[in-house]
Image (spheres, helix red, strand yellow):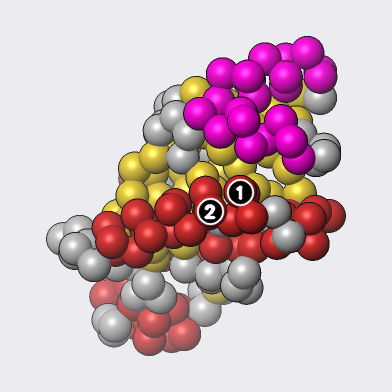
Amino acid sequence: MEKIYDQKKVAACIAKSKYHAVLDTMDLDFYLIKYEKGEFVSSPFQNTLLFQIVEQGSINIYLIRDDGTRYCLSNGTTDYFLGDMDIFYPRSGSIYAEAAETLTCIAFSIEKHRDMLLSNSRFLTLICNSLSSKIGAMTTIEAAPASLTERVMSYMKYKCEDNTLKGIERSAFHLHCSARQLQRILNQKETAGSVTKIGKGTYRLV
């Protein structure tokens, strides 16, 4: 991830944005963020609340349940909003946005500018349109079929802090499997080099 504060580059991206007429009227501390493919653009583990607008590239947005089941909520490209729900509600502990390719976003802090955002009717109109589209899409989602092994890998990647599974019994409960099944999968993945054991009942994704 790379943050870019060069105001000429920021202004050029805003000028190309579909929303430039609204953004130009807002006194916000805009900057750019570049992500590499596979990097999290937004996740429950990130401390800073950001509003981001995709300027170039694409993202995949997932909902991951505690048992590792993955739902694809949306695929976002140019002009897609991230952080619109965070303006109004506490951040979800289950939604992740991941760069599907090299990605550039226009960004600003939600917490720093929340009052200004909530008082800007033109901006709120954009947010309403965005959220309406997302809610409509969510009514048709289905869980992607996944084996227990795939769910274990998703659980470690998305639900475990630092990609580290701690506690076989507790994790098996969340994954709806037996501790023996989970241990067997972890042993197989350790042999394959996908995970490494770093302590008793503790494994980290490689």
Residue 137 screen position, x and y as percent: 27, 58
Q: Secondary structure at mark 2?
A: helix
Q: Local crowd at mark 1 within 10 Å, few (<14), some, or many (≥20)?
A: few
Residue behind mark 1: 122
Residue 47 visible here: no
Tags 1 and 2 in contact by the CB under 8 Å rule? yes
Q: Nearer the viewer, residue 193 or 141?
A: 141
The residue lying at 40 percent from left, 75 percent from top is 66
**x and y percent of residue 72 in the render?**
30, 55
Q: Secondary structure at mark 1?
A: helix
- The prevailing secondary structure element of the residues shown in magenta is helix
- Residue 196: % across, % down: 50, 53
Residue 14 appears in the rendering: yes
Q: Which mark is residue 125?
A: 2
In the rendered view, would you say 81 is above or below 161? above
Q: Residue 102 or 91: which is nearer the viewer?
A: 91
The amino acid at mark 2 is: Thr
Q: Vertically, is 37 above or below 157?
A: above
Asked whether, in this view, residue 107 is left or right of residue 124, the answer is right
Q: Is residue 154 above or below residue 184?
A: above
Magenta region: 6-26
